[in-house]
Amino acid sequence: MTLANWCIAAACLLPTMVALTPKVASFKDQDHYDNTHPRDWESRQVGWKRRAHAAHLNGFEALPLFIAAVILAQQANANQDRIDILAMAFVLIRVVYSIIYISNLAILRTLVWFAGVGVSLAILAMA
C-alpha cells in the first residue's frame, strides 16, 4: 500500500476525529453528549462546538475529489513520490483547516480550503 493510500485512510478518519472533539469536551458540561439523540445534541451546540461539527461535515465533503485524484493519478502511473508528497500535504492542510475552522478564523479558513482543493487538483492533473 502506498503512502498516498495511507493518506486516503487518514483523510477519511480525520472528520470523525474532529467530530469527537466537542463530544469528549462536553462530558464535563451540563449538556453532555447524548448518544441516544446525537442530532438533537448537535443542533443545540454553539461556538467552537458548532464550528467543529461544521468542520467535520466539510471534511467529508473534501474527500471525493481527493480520493478520486489519488486513484486516477495512480492508475495513470504518475510519479508515485509526487503523489505521496501531495497526499501528505492534503492531510496536513485538512488538519490545519479543521483547527482554523474551530478557532473561527474565517478568512484564513477560506485560504486554507483553497489550498486543499488546489492540492487535490494538482494530484488530479497528474492523471
Image (cartoon, helix red, strand yellow):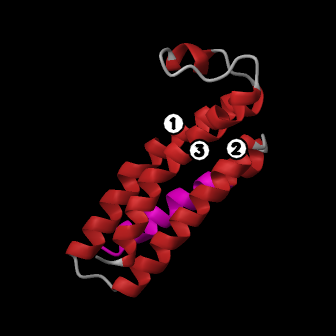
Label 2 neighbour load within 10 Å: few <14, some 14-19, many 20+:
many
Task: Name the residue beneath numbered marker 1.
Answer: 57
Residue at image location 50% in from the left, 14% down from the top: 37
Q: In the depicted view, which residue is nearer to us: 63 or 24?
A: 24
Label count reads: 3
Determine the secondary structure under disc 1: helix
Q: CA distance from mark 3 to mark 1?
A: 9 Å
Which amino acid type corresponds to the residue marked 2 in the rendered image?
Tyr
Determine the secondary structure under disc 2: helix
Residue 110 drawn above or below residue 82: above
Q: What number is the disc on residue 18?
A: 3
Q: Position of residue 9 (x, y in %)?
A: 38, 60
Residue at image location 58% in from the left, 39% down from the top: 20
Task: Name the residue beneath numbered marker 2.
Answer: 101
Which amino acid type corresponds to the residue marked 1 in the rendered image?
Leu
Q: Position of residue 120 (x, y in %)?
A: 45, 62
Q: Nearer the viewer, mark 3 or mark 2?
A: 3
Label 3 neighbour load within 10 Å: few <14, some 14-19, many 20+:
many
Quadrant occupied by the N terminus:
bottom left
Which amino acid type corresponds to the residue marked 3 in the rendered image?
Val
Residue 33 lies left or right of residue 36; in this view the side is right
**Is residue 106 a member of the stretch shown in magenta?**
no
Determine the secondary structure under disc 3: helix
Residue range (magenta): 112-127
Q: In the depicted view, which residue is nearer to us: 116 or 87?
A: 87
Q: CA distance from mark 3 to mark 2?
A: 11 Å
